[in-house]
Image (cartoon, coloured by chain):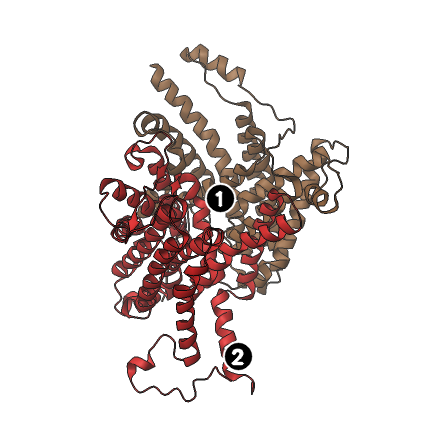
Chain colours: A red, B brown
Amino acid sequence: MLYREAGDFKTSYAEDNQTFPIKFDRVGYYVVLAVAVLVVPFFINDYWASAFLIPFLIYAIAAIGLNILTGYCGQVSLGTGGFMAVGAYASYKLMTAFPWMDMVTVTLLSGLVTAAVGVVFGLPSLRIKGFYLAVATLAAQFFLVWLFNKVGWFYNYSASGQINAPEREFFGLILTGPNAAAATQYLFCLAFVLVLAWVARNLTRGTVGRKWMAIRDMDIAAEIIGVNPLRAKLSAFAVSSFFVGISGALFFTIYLGAVEVGEAFGIQKSFLVLFMIIIGGLGSIFGSFAGAAFLVLLPVVLKLVGVDLLGWPTDIVAHLQLVIVGGLIVFFLIVEPHGLAQLWRVTKEKLRLWPFPH
Amino acid sequence: MPDQVLFGLEVALNGLMAGVMYSLVALGFVLIFKASGIFNYAQGVMALFAAMTLVGIQNGQVPFSHLINATFGTDIHYFGWQAPALLAILLTVVVMAVFAWLVNRLVFRHLVNQEPIILFMATIGLAYFLEGVADLMWGSEIKKLDVGLPQGINEWIDGATFEIFGYGFFIDNLDLVATVIAALLVGGLVVFSQYTKQGRALRAVADDHQAALSVGISLNFIWVLVWSIAGFVALVAGIMWGAKSGVQFSLSLIALKALPVLMLGGFTSIPGAIVGGLIIGVGEKLFEFLIGAPYLGGATENWFAYVLALAFLVVRPQGLFGEKIIERV
């Protein structure tokens, strides 16, 4: 009844092309924003910040990044973990080499460094396609992790081989390190998520995004109608790596604080982010958020139910988690290959007709 | 000959042996890919699952005992019998065949005509699922696998090379056995696919699904068959790796090692899988020996295979022996 486009008259092209054409959606979007910015920071506590909210925000950035590459441009990448590691180590080097630099600059620069690395590893995509490319990106994953493990310069020759985020302030509030307040960290990540999601949404519906999608749907046909595959593919790699690099930097500076590269950015991370966009929905910004929320929340819920409620040992719950995640992926691919985003679309379609479906 | 050259030769020989192991896993990939166009990422986990099942049956472990004990407060672990190795292997083959049937019935039948990349992702999901099931079923601790294969240094090669070069080569008996078994396996597969009815049907399906279907070959049956064969190959690979380094989670990571082998050899070629495995095995061992360990700080084996495969692919996008990729608009 509320969910109608009737009566919502568009009088300009800009209005006609807006992201949320239905008023209910628009209002809902602003309400969610207002809650996220104005309400959540006052009620946030350390447990929920570190168990759900902050990882969710950071993974959402990574998922949007991978979705740009895989969902919009059709280039499957299994190197996300490696690129996140580039972002993390870039931010570490920047923070330690230029202690006066503020965190926003550090994070953005880390993203740019990752984008450059991403373009280098994206070069083979001009010649290699499909599976072959997916496996080729594994070269990036394993090589980068090995590099950060072996070359002392990257971790400033620390004895443990770990990197630790030094304490930094942001407008007088402690942002990184163990003394940071959950609300500060949350707001910092949220700001990045909002800006980046806005950028991604507008990139993907503009010229660049259409070129990506043309390449995804059939690269030869796209080339014939005048899309330059070199530019389209490399720009997708660059933008995607930029996002992934920022998420890697935040993952290290804000969320973990101390990182051992093989553990934090191993191949498992690449798969995790890939699962997020499969479950969330390939080629959808909303899907990236949904998938990230789902896969971050799943272990938390499983632990609450399995360990705290049923009293099972933690290793059984960990194994069950594998079974459930694996099963869900297969289930989603069979029942709804376009993920949670498609479910949401179908629901909206139903809502528009409700309560008179005929 | 100087010591360094001899040592390098020994490293290369051992690389060849490791390459045989990679080829074994890659073989399972190629079989399924040829017959159904599914790039089966779960092959490595299948090897793990097969090896764990084998050990479990041999030791008479109760499946899911950990879960049962946690839920019902019981304390059961073993049936209390020891199965002979051959019987256990046969039972495991049966389990893998049942698994093949289930996978086709429950998963891939619903995914017919989907894009290859969707199928690939489904097998990643399957790999996670199977890994979880394997851990729940048999427990995740490292197990010792012993089916009576010879192990340790081969004295004869050691002695013979010592007499010729004055330097004894270290070759593990297990690696030799693995090589022989791999050769037998490939020979068996060739005979099977050339001279039996099912084998011919299999090749027909690999060649053209539609044409095979139109002459009355049951695709469902062929897919179950090929997954069963892949399960059997996984079991063989699992036994070899398990005997070498114990049955544990890292076994499933050999799938990741088999990927560059496949890329190098081409996804559709059985000889490609073998040659690719050998090139990767020798290449990574020699690179580690000549450049990795002395100049780069070691552990280059983690990524060298991928970079090598990438270099090959840039020159030849379909791999060494793969079918030429033809694209149409």
Q: Residues within 10 Å of mark 2 (few under 14, many from 20)?
A: some
Where on the picture, by quarter, is residue B292?
top left
Q: Nearer the viewer, residue B112 or A262?
A: A262
Rendered position, B63 above or below A57: above
**Residue A340 at x, y = what percent?**
50, 65
**Residue A181 at x, y = what percent?**
39, 51
What SS does tag 2 mark? helix
Where on the picture, by quarter, is residue B215?
bottom right
Left or right: residue B211 versus residue A215 is right
In the picture, the quarter occupied by the C terminus of chain B is bottom left
Q: Residue at x 42, y 49 (%)?
A: B322
Q: Numbered disc 1: what chain?
A: B
Q: Nearer the viewer, residue A170 or B226?
A: A170
Is residue B197 visible in the rendered image? The answer is no
Where on the picture, by quarter, is residue A264?
top left
- Residue B270's tag is 1
Read off the residue under disc 2: A350
Q: Nearer the viewer, residue B218 or A81?
A: A81
